[in-house]
Image (cartoon, rainbow, N blue to C red):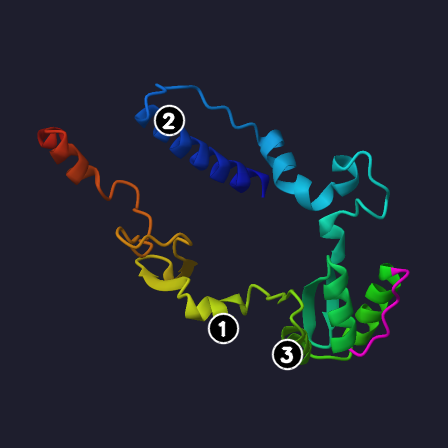
Amino acid sequence: MADKVTAMAAAQAAVAALLARERGAGGQRVDVPMLDVSIAFLWMDMAGPQTLLDATADESQPVGGARRFFEFRDGWGVVSVTRAVDLARAAEALGVQADGDDPDVTREALRAAAQPLSMAEAGELLANAGVPFGLCRTLDDVHEDPQVVASELFAESEHPEGGRIREPRSPVRFSATPTSRPAPSAAPGQHTAEVLDELGQGSVRS
């Protein structure tokens, strides 16, 4: 995760630096330390008490702490009850008596109420109640998720040596310059002739 998030931050930094150069700021060195990026990425969700230094414990609960995994009869999901209104709606949807004095008691009651439900049943109840949630997909079925199918995220191709391959296309969509479908990586030496021809060194081929 740290490797990939840092790479994304580096790409964003490069674009920002190019824009600054275009606006007359000149070239510059851009540092993107992996540790710094990782901490910044996680801080908002996990470090409430370490951010609001003068707040009470009740006022500085980490946002990520209220997004908990729930076990259903046939799988798992994450229910986000970061606000009191979401907690109350979730309690009503799953038939739980909310404890206004202790939200953790309500969350544990929700966890117990969720276990007999299927993912589909819980998803319908929570969606109708307007509670933010997400169902956890396994790697075996994520390509069949309705939203993934609707967005046409995955593309299948035939690799000359590996056979059929399923892989996600670029998650970024450009209206004027759409990206092409993934192509298989080249075999060693596959494009040597073309490269040498472009360099005007076609005569040195082995």
* Residue lying at 50% horizontally and 36% vertically, measured from the top left: 9
Q: How far from the left and from the top, in percent, is residue 133?
A: 65, 65
State which mark lies toward you, 3 or 1.
Answer: 3
- Badge 3 is on which residue? 124
Q: How far from the left and from the top, in percent, is residue 162?
A: 38, 58
Instruction: Check disc 3 and give the amino acid type.
Output: Glu
* Residue lying at 58% horizontally and 34% vertically, measured from the top left: 37
Q: Residue furthest right?
A: 101
Instruction: Check disc 1 and give the amino acid type.
Output: Pro
- Badge 2 is on which residue? 20
User: How far apart are the two marked residues, 3 and 2, measured between alpha carbons?
Assistant: 48 Å
- Badge 1 is on which residue? 146
Instruction: Check disc 2 and give the amino acid type.
Output: Ala
* Closer to us: 79 or 84: 84
Q: Please give the range of residues in magenta.
A: 94-102
- Mark 3 neighbour class, 10 Å CA radius: few under 14, some 14 to 19, many 20 or more: few
The local secondary structure at tag 1 comes to helix
Helix, strand or loop for the magenta stretch, by majority: loop
The local secondary structure at tag 2 comes to helix
- Tell me the quarter of the image containing the C terminus: top left
Labels 1 and 2: the sequence-earlier one: 2
State which mark lies toward you, 3 or 2.
Answer: 2
Residue 28 relative to residue 60: left or right = left
Residue 37 relative to residue 58: left or right = left
* Closer to us: 18 or 150: 18
Labels 3 and 2: the sequence-earlier one: 2
